[in-house]
Image (cartoon, rainbow, N blue to C red):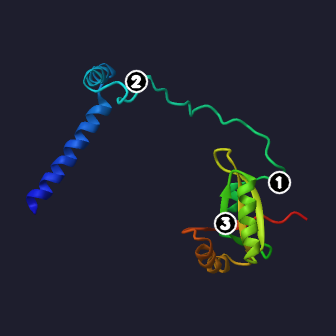
Amino acid sequence: MIVKLSTVVILILLGALLYVAGVLAPDSVRQEVESRVRRVIPSDIVAPELSNLKMPDFSAAPKKTALPEGTISADQLLLSGTSTDDTRYAVQAGAFADTQHAEALAKRLRDMQYPIRMLSIVDGRNAHWIIVAAGSYTSANDARKIRAALSSQLGVPSMSVIQLPPEKK
């Protein structure tokens, strides 16, 4: 048993060492290995040269797009330590990039007799999301109690409790 375990550990360590050596290898060594592999294995089986791949430029600022009126920051949905008599809580049933999927979930929740609010938010990377919030509770604990039942009904393993922004009058 110990011999088998030792063999497995040695093979894993050898694989990790080869991986690290391949990652840290200079381009000249990598190109030499690729050329030798191409001589042995037919070209239609070998992957394209990795040295020609270019990484996208993530440093560029995201494009600003026009957001729907009433869009809020995602930070406004986080539970705060303070609340007022007007503070309401809900279960975040879903977050969608497109309205069609958000509306489909909202309809399903309405059919299950949950009050629904759809919130247009922007996250920290300026990505636009539509949040489907189920319920409207006076305490976060009340929302947490409903979260388990809703999670089971929808077959979603994890849902968040959020603080709803005040409704526009």
11, 88: nearer the viewer: 11
Distance (Cα) linking label 1 and label 3: 18 Å
> Which quadrant of the view contains residue 101?
bottom right
Query: Which SS class for mark 1?
Result: loop
90 sits to left or right of 26: right
Mark number for residue 132?
Answer: none
Task: State the SS at label 3.
Answer: strand
Q: Amino acid at mark 3?
A: Gln
At label 1, counting other C-alpha atoms closer than 10 Å, the crowd grade (few under 14, some 14-19, many 20 or more) is: few
x then y, percent, for residue 86 = 80, 73
Label 2 is placed on what type of residue?
Ser
- The residue sitting at 68% across, 44% down in the picture is 126
Sequence-first disc among 1 and 3: 1
> Label 1: which residue?
70
Please tell me in which quadrant of the rendered image residue 5 appears.
bottom left
User: Which residue lies under the disc numbered 2?
Assistant: 51
Provide the residue designation for mark 3: 92
- Nearer the observer, 47 or 44: 44
Residue neighbourhood size for the residue with mark 2, other residues' Cα within 10 Å, grouped as few (<14), some (14–19), many (≥20): few
Alpha carbon distance from label 2 to label 3:
44 Å
